[in-house]
Image (cartoon, helix red, strand yellow):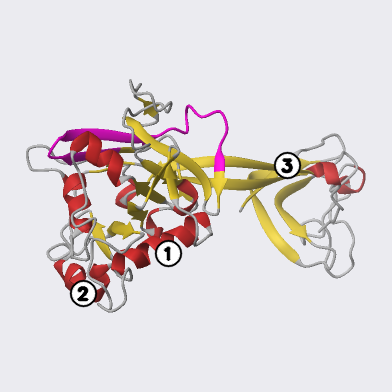
Amino acid sequence: MSFKRLEADDFVISADSITAGLWTGGSPTLTGFYTSSTQELSSAGNYYLNIYQLDPLTETDADIQFAIAYGNESGYGSVLYNTSVTGKSYTSTIYGQYRTLVLGDENSSFSYGGITASDFWAISIDRNRYKESLFPGSLTLVLSGSGGTVSLTDNSQVVTSVQFNDAGRVFQIVSGSAGTVYSGSGTDGINGYSVSSGSFGLFLPDIATLLLNPNALDQTISLVPAQRSSYNDGDNNVVLYDAISGSAADPGSFRLNSQETISSDFIFVRPRSSEYNYSENPSFISGSTGEVLYSSFINNPTTYITTVGLYNDNSELLAVAKLSRPLQKDFTKEALIRVKLDF
């Protein structure tokens, strides 16, 4: 066994972005949408609605894909926790949670394309569906309402600078498909929609969340939350679920990919011509006397490199790299071995 200290120029770090289908099984497109009556009727169902790719009541392979929630700043759209306390309801709690998560300020309001709104629908992707973040430019969400259908995507492919908030990167949700923005005819100045109520929402890839603007959806496809000005249960999670799932004749489609940055550390090990030509292997030297077994190995030795071990300064083995086949080495040969560590 021989040791050699590596130099700074023997290390190269590389980062590659890996994309994959978001939904169960690695599929990029979700076309089956099911809910669980058990979850919907539970106390958690007052806050959010889980969506599965298969019927959870009959299929053991049913997995949660995403959750739907409705938030309202004034607490409208659900009953009050206490009729004596105005404005405190399930929807106000959802609004406050996302306001803290996204805006980081309980006094701020959500703005869609420069237009402020007091409510939203939230689509939160299940954490098991992705490793790091959502992939901007891969979104296609088709929604159906009594006024027609609309295909939504994000504007990451057309913006010149990326905006950030407490949730990370922020993109506007606009009409389009898979990052291709449809040209709008309105005067609001933002590509992809032509409604005066702002963009269709916010795409937040770093927290795997979409916030949809009910005002824009109401204006385009007549999709409007129920009970937006009263403290009555509007079942607004189901309203968006119906818009996403579509119908038997026209099923919904939700296309989205995940993204992960894989960092690789490339380590170049360079056995020079004068190095690694002798071995302590019992086939090379005598274990009892330490003599070279074959006289030809004294002046013209031949060894075979099979393994590279990486040690720290305390002589602790940190990683082992195995060569695909033994590498012949003698005084007439030099080698360059590239070790790749992914993390």
Query: Mark 1 — residue?
Result: 97
Query: Mark 2 — residue?
Result: 42
Q: Nearer the viewer, mark 3 or mark 2?
A: 2
Instruction: Inspect this view and state whether residue 317 appears.
Output: yes
The residue drawn where x is 36% and y is 27% is 192
Q: Position of residue 79 (x, y in %)?
A: 22, 70
Is 214 left or right of 15, judged from the image as shown? left
Residue type, label 2: Ser
What segment carries the magenta color?
Answer: 141-163
Q: Position of residue 144 (x, y in %)?
A: 18, 39
Tell me the SS state at disc 1: helix
The residue drawn where x is 45% and y is 52% is 109
Q: Are marks 2 and 1 in contact (CB under 8 Å)?
A: no
The residue drawn where x is 36% and y is 67% is 93
Between the C-alphas of marks 3 and 1, the distance is 52 Å
Tell me the SS state at disc 2: loop
- In this rendered view, identify the residue nearer to me: 6 or 170: 170
Q: Are marks 3 and 2 in contact (CB under 8 Å)?
A: no
For disc 2, the neighbor class at 10 Å (few under 14, some 14 to 19, many from 20) is few
Query: Mark 3 — residue?
Result: 337
- Between disc 3 and disc 2, whose residue precedes? 2
Q: Position of residue 165 (x, y in %)?
A: 55, 49
